[in-house]
Amino acid sequence: MKLPRISSRLVKIIWMANLGLGLILGLAAGSLWLNNASGHPVFASAPEHTPTPLIQWTPGPFFRPSATPASHNTVEDTNTSGPYGPYIIGTSFSGRPIVVYRFGTGARERLIVAGIHGGNEWNTVVLAYQLIDYLSANPDTVPADKTLYILPLLNPDGAARAHDRTGRVNDRGVDLNRNWPYRWAAEWDREGCWNYLPTSAGEYAGSEPETQTLMAFIEKHNFDALISYHSAALGIFAGGVPTLPESDRLARALEKVSPYSYPPMDTGCNYTGNLADWASSVHGIAAVDIELRNHRDSDFEENLRVLKTFLNWEP
């Protein structure tokens, strides 16, 4: 059943309420310290275009620090920390590393992406690192026939800049979830869409090094399912235009074990050039966007159920 369309004004009120609460709680918690569990990221402010390493890893079987950011490239598996990662697969516009973690050795590959927007969607990055921690302690969660990759932060430049709306875009001012080469548009009707600050879809489709990095990684693998995490509150979006049937079935399976609604809330926004649609319509991957409930919580327990369902789901 399709949910009723709501006005863009109401959407902005919801987003602003989430943002305000998130800022208050973030400041009370110390703002920069996200979590004291091992492996969680620490965001640091950095001057524009300074290639300062962003993520601090706790040494262990799954967490190895990279001494220096890679040069601008999309080279897979440049780290030497063993078969599970972290792997540097490329760099951001300002030279920060883009890192992937691997779990399992099965032939069937799945992918989770977080932090495609920085700023007030930082809680998706926290969630990704919580899942990494959980899987490193519970590797049997991944079925024997599967390999799972987690990319916890696609937009390290935005995350380094701020935990508010000013951190949404990369250091070239591009919304990375508008830059994918499927239904890309230089301009779109901003009504019902995120419209707090000026954003760009890029000079052309796939123009950004972050997009190019993830595109190259996906095209080197044989993924059959993908989750892209966002926040906040709109529900689950199934990839593809028209919606890929496998994406629809995956979305329905994840809705059953989570608090996220499917179909999602309809704000009237035209979502051009996004990752899930590109993955589904170009590569036939069952792909969904999942929006966390707000901009401050990681919804870890809920997404542990999502993770297990995602890993055991059959297309």
Image (cartoon, rainbow, N blue to C red):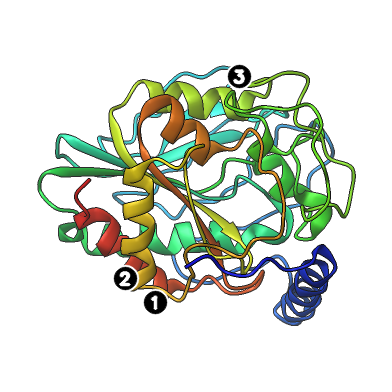
Q: Residue at x 76, y 34 (%)?
A: 174
Q: Quadrant of residue 94?
A: top right
For the residues marked 3 and 1, what is the alpha-carbon distance in whole angstroms? 37 Å
Q: Residues within 10 Å of mark 3 (few under 14, many from 20)?
A: some
- Of residues 271 and 43, the one nearer the viewer is 271
State the residue position of label 2: 305
Image position of 209 (left or right of 258): right
Where disc 3 sits, the SS reads loop
* The disc label shown at residue 265, or none: none
- Of residues 91 and 14, the one nearer the viewer is 14
State the residue position of label 3: 71
Q: Position of residue 295 (x, y in %)?
A: 67, 69
Q: Position of residue 106 (x, y in %)?
A: 14, 39
Q: Residue at x 48, y 38 (%)?
A: 242
Which numbered disc, 3 or 1, marks the residue closer to the eye?
1
For the residues marked 2 and 1, what is the alpha-carbon distance in whole angstroms? 7 Å
Where disc 2 sits, the SS reads helix
For the residues marked 3 and 2, what is the alpha-carbon distance in whole angstroms? 37 Å
Q: Of the two numbered discs 3 and 1 on the same chain, state the one appearing first in sequence.
A: 3
Q: Position of residue 96 (x, y in %)?
A: 64, 34
**Residue pushed farthest left?**
144
Q: Are marks 2 and 1 in contact (CB under 8 Å)?
A: yes
- Of residues 58 and 96, the one nearer the viewer is 96
State the residue position of label 1: 301
Check the image and report above or below for 249 versus 187: below
* Res. 41 in view: no
Q: Position of residue 38 (x, y in %)?
A: 44, 64
Q: Are marks 3 and 1 in contact (CB under 8 Å)?
A: no
Q: Amino acid at mark 2?
A: Arg
Where disc 1 sits, the SS reads helix
